[in-house]
Amino acid sequence: MEEHDVGDRSGAAMTTAFDGAPLEVDTRPAVLDQFTVDETGQAGRRPSGVVYPTGVDEVAALVRWARATRTPLIPRGAGTSLEGHLLAQREELIVDLSQANSILDISPADFTATVQPGLTRTQLNAATAESGLQFTVDPGADASIGGMAATNASGTTTVRYGGMRANVLALQAVLPDGSVVRLGRAVRKSSSGYDLKDLLIGSAGTLGIITELTVRLHPIPEWLRSLRVSFPTVSAAVDAAVEMLGAALPVSRLELVDTPSMVAINAFRGTDYAESPALFIDVESSSEPAAAAEEREIRRIVQANNAVEIAVAHTHTERHALWEDRHNLYFAVKSRHPGSRFLVTDTAVPYSQLAATVETTTRLGAELGLAVSVAGHIGDGNVHTMVPYTELNHAAVQQFSDSLVRHALAVGGTATGEHGIGLTKKKYLRDEHGDAVDVMIAIKRAMDPMNLFNPGKVLDT
Amino acid sequence: MEEHDVGDRSGAAMTTAFDGAPLEVDTRPAVLDQFTVDETGQAGRRPSGVVYPTGVDEVAALVRWARATRTPLIPRGAGTSLEGHLLAQREELIVDLSQANSILDISPADFTATVQPGLTRTQLNAATAESGLQFTVDPGADASIGGMAATNASGTTTVRYGGMRANVLALQAVLPDGSVVRLGRAVRKSSSGYDLKDLLIGSAGTLGIITELTVRLHPIPEWLRSLRVSFPTVSAAVDAAVEMLGAALPVSRLELVDTPSMVAINAFRGTDYAESPALFIDVESSSEPAAAAEEREIRRIVQANNAVEIAVAHTHTERHALWEDRHNLYFAVKSRHPGSRFLVTDTAVPYSQLAATVETTTRLGAELGLAVSVAGHIGDGNVHTMVPYTELNHAAVQQFSDSLVRHALAVGGTATGEHGIGLTKKKYLRDEHGDAVDVMIAIKRAMDPMNLFNPGKVLDT
């Protein structure tokens, strides 16, 4: 530790004054070691310490102190990043916001909630349920709302409700210059000034540390149908999915699960579903007659696309069981590859490129001898694959991932639909955005000239 | 004209070479005079000339030339701005993009279209209709797609389909440094890099000149109901509207029209509708049984809120007639105030503040002796009022408008839901955004250090 010192390096947790705010700093090596590896097994350096602010005043004091001592900071929520956003590159101080997790306001009349960044989405949903409202963004992991905003997360319900940009109305953030600002307004629309709210969303803590969010809530639907439909080919499943979107059906989840994934589900859950590409579908209707009509319309569409197996869940219990299969997919695949780590890819492509993209994925996996499982948010054109790897075939998995990103970019897609650029996908930023990267760098330099906010993530300055 | 000279000041249209691109420049005073007054009657200075580029190469050449000669530019689409975006403040050159109006691609399989900025929304919809698809953003005026992006326009369908940020997937733009960049990707979601696409949307040409847009298309609904429902009070109408939103009904338009507006409609259209606050509603269903069920649910909700008159349109002809009343509201109100100019206000507030906001509006109008008509996109919390004025009561109308903005900001709303800050609402920017305005200024300075792109609009640098 050269210029900055956040406590006794060897010792236990201790309290340090950060520009007037007394905060406990944990510098115990055993604690810090836990921050050197992320969810995906990627490794970074040991950070200089971890601090747990509980509110905006403490974060602002920390930032003032960081400026004075030139200490780089890594803001952190629930730690579920898949792209290395949270890994230290230098001797950063981890700003763990998991204890800044209060609900500040729930306003059913406005369909909004205002929360601190460390609150997780399931904590928020537990609190809003009694008002008949829900926070809809669902990335799978029980991520923090602040972390989800930082990575512009989305997930299974995005096809109907949008991702974080659509569901965060306003933010409070501490900027690298130490100022506390409010971005956006807690209304449904505004054309006032530049859209700084959406600039911070997805910036992965490189432009500001989010200290408060006002999010949209949506009514919890009363009339739901869930379906699992198997098709002879991926292409038939994709055609049916796009046809449903074209029919303006109120689909709220539209997930593609490929054959290897269905095999894994059967083995893990003891089921005997058709082992061919399937769609998992939720439809949210406004009344029971509407739900019945919409179910008939979906049956007509999937049958016209040669569906081989159709399961419809009507009750809450049935629907829960149907989606448990999909939600457990990661564990189902994992259990078939004990001792392996997993790489999860995350490209998104135009609808017209979906079937070909899944075929390319499967072919590339076979060529490289990899056990690839595909699970896509097909309604968003977002294709995930899970690939187990060990030290023996790590290079092949990297090559697979690289080929998929290059394919997505070549067909007009994006390197990341919802996980973010983080550390691992920086190399694709210029391929995707060209000279626009220079504008991103200019903005980062203007807002964080000392490069103290999550340095080296998203882009290099 | 001091430093820059775009042609013979006195003469007719002539061709000038802009950094290699020969373009006709119109400097005829009679032509330029047409650009000194906007839709709302606000006056600016006479611009130095008007030029009509047809594509990105010409725009890029113009920008290079503008940098070399330090000539400020005002990009312009269909000229329907209501907030002075297009009024010259110095001797700007008007970059009229109305001839850059080609459709470059329609991809029904991707639900997208790629267009030049000067294309209007009705031109686009005429071209996509045969594919069963529509561009949904409808601000009323037949604005250009590029102009709508520049002001982050929205309108009657925003409650279901969102505004321009939700419907523009990708942009091509020429930046003040002369570079041609692509922002965003033509996919449903991306977490790659900073969100520059949404930064340019709503920046009113101050950060870049949009030269191409890829927009989302949505299926043209087959099963529609339109309703006009009258209520005893504004507050009953608002309650019914919020209840419909809470019931997850597939409402695609949800408009409030107040008593004076209904009186104007009756007089203009020769109708005898109840002269009390009304909702105009569109519901888009996925099948006829769903439509019937949704109509019943809406009837139940409005009756529970003491509806006094319910008209339902089932056929295309009936629906067209019902919406003609709403679409003609501006002309209906105008015809009652011959010789007057009109001010149109545009605040948006949280739902819980809607009824009180409309009441405040009506009370303020009465206190100031103004003939105020309210027509709100109630599903977005966006309240417009139309106020006729002459030279005699212009000051009172300004005071009315100012009071409404200050009311909206005080209750957590925004100075502009969809028209933009332009020139007229700059004075409210810091009240709404506080120190975040300094970040906006820093971004403007970083991207346009010579302040050549629509200078003095949105903010002062």
Image: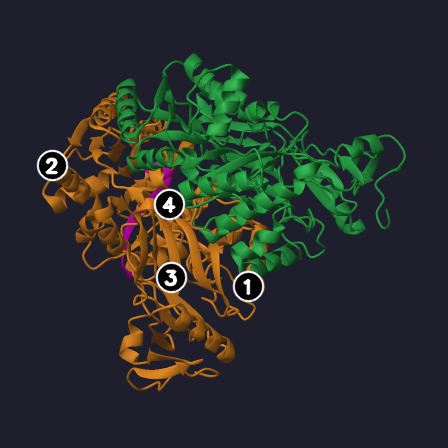
Chain colours: A orange, B green
Label 3 amino acid?
A: Gly
Left or right: residue B346 versus residue B87 is left
Image disc number at residue A84: 3
| Labels 2, 1: front one | 1
In magenta, the rendered stretch is: A378-391
Q: Chain of mark 3?
A: A
Q: Position of residue B211 (x, y in %)?
A: 63, 38
Q: Residue at x 68, y 40 (%)?
A: B86
Spatial distance from mark 4 to mark 1, Cα to Cα? 35 Å
- Chain of the residue under the numbered disc 1 shown in the image: A
- Identify the amino acid type marked 4: Ser
Q: Which residue is depicted at the point 30% across and 86% down?
A: A11
In the picture of the structure, the residue carrying the numbered disc 1 is: A447
Magenta run includes residue A390 = yes
Mark 1, Cα crowd under 10 Å, few <14 / some 14-19 / many 20+, is many
- Give the spatial CA distance, label 4 vs label 2: 51 Å
Say what amino acid the circle numbered 1 marks: Met
Chain of the residue under the numbered disc 4 shown in the image: B
